[in-house]
Image: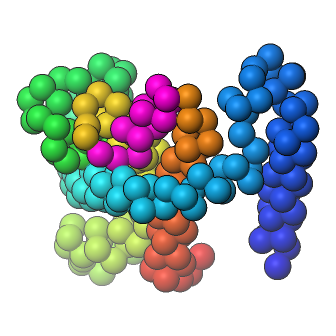
Amino acid sequence: MRRWLLPGLLLAALVGAWQVAASTGALADLLGLEPFLVPSPAEIADALWQDRTLTAENAWVTLREILLGLGIALVVGVAVGLAMHLSKVARDTLSPLIVASQAVPIIVIAPILVIWFGYGIWPKAAVVALICFFPVALGVVAGLRSADPAATKMMRTLDASRAQILWRVESPWALPSFFTGAKVAVVIAPIGAVFGEWVGANQGLGRAIIYDNAQLQTASLFADVVALAAMALVLYGLLALAERRVVTWR
């Protein structure tokens, strides 16, 4: 109860203070802006309700991009993590390339992907995959390498093969780290989708944010951001639930 009650009370207090400050004009005066540029939570909720159909359509487009890119990142991240754990040659070869892939700003890569693949779903999914790949691969490698040496040694004394050690000892040991990396990835995945949509898209929450910003429809802009945040929270919650079902010993 406390885990839900305390954050809920804090959020309610912040939203209440925002509502009072925005409705009285105090927040606009503090920021030096016109009152219509500083919407209250009630106005944001009204915009979210009025544009619910359009917001749902854009959210579905963005969600598909996130799920596709996240799926690619999970598959490739696990495969690369396993390869780096099992082979020193793969580890020495791939480690610098993985770090280099994260050193290039994603906002630079996104326009290139749009030029190559057009305005469809694949450039956005590729951007999401590039952002999410690193924490997944890092979590897999860290988890596999943290396996108890005593358990591994015991398996060797029982004449276990390398595959059996990987399956029975190292993989279960790596699951918590894998889920930690996956939860980081699922939180930052919407950022990649929005970046991709900002570069070139006809639909999506990122496209809606650009349009609302250009039209100075700040209430609708905040509504798009709320929908994007809610999407990330739901995906995080589903992944956390999956972790509790799989990693039962925690």
Q: Residue at x 24, y 46 (%)?
A: 125
Q: Farthest left residue? A: 116
Q: Residue at x 80, y 17 (%)?
A: 32
Corner quadrant of residue 123:
top left
In this rendering, the count of numbered labels is 0
Q: Residue at x 25, y 31 (%)?
A: 200
Horizontal and vertical percent for residue 3? Answer: 79, 70
Residue nearer the viewer, 166 or 126: 126
Decide: is 244 above or below 92. below
Q: Which residues are magenta?
A: 203-215
Kindly report the secondary structure that dominates the magenta region of the rendered protein: helix
Q: How is the image coloured?
A: rainbow
Is residue 74 at least partly visible in the picture? no
- Image quarter hosting the N terminus: bottom right
Is residue 138 part of the magenta span, yes or no?
no
Residue nearer the viewer, 19 or 72: 19
Q: Residue at x 87, y 52 (%)?
A: 16
Horizontal and vertical percent for residue 199? Answer: 29, 28
- Image quarter hosting the C terminus: bottom right
Horizontal and vertical percent for residue 235? Answer: 47, 64
Q: Is residue 61 left or right of residue 191?
A: left
Q: Is residue 154 left or right of residue 226?
A: left
Is residue 58 at least partly visible in the picture? yes
Decide: is 164 above or below 47. below
Q: Is residue 110 left or right of residue 22?
A: left
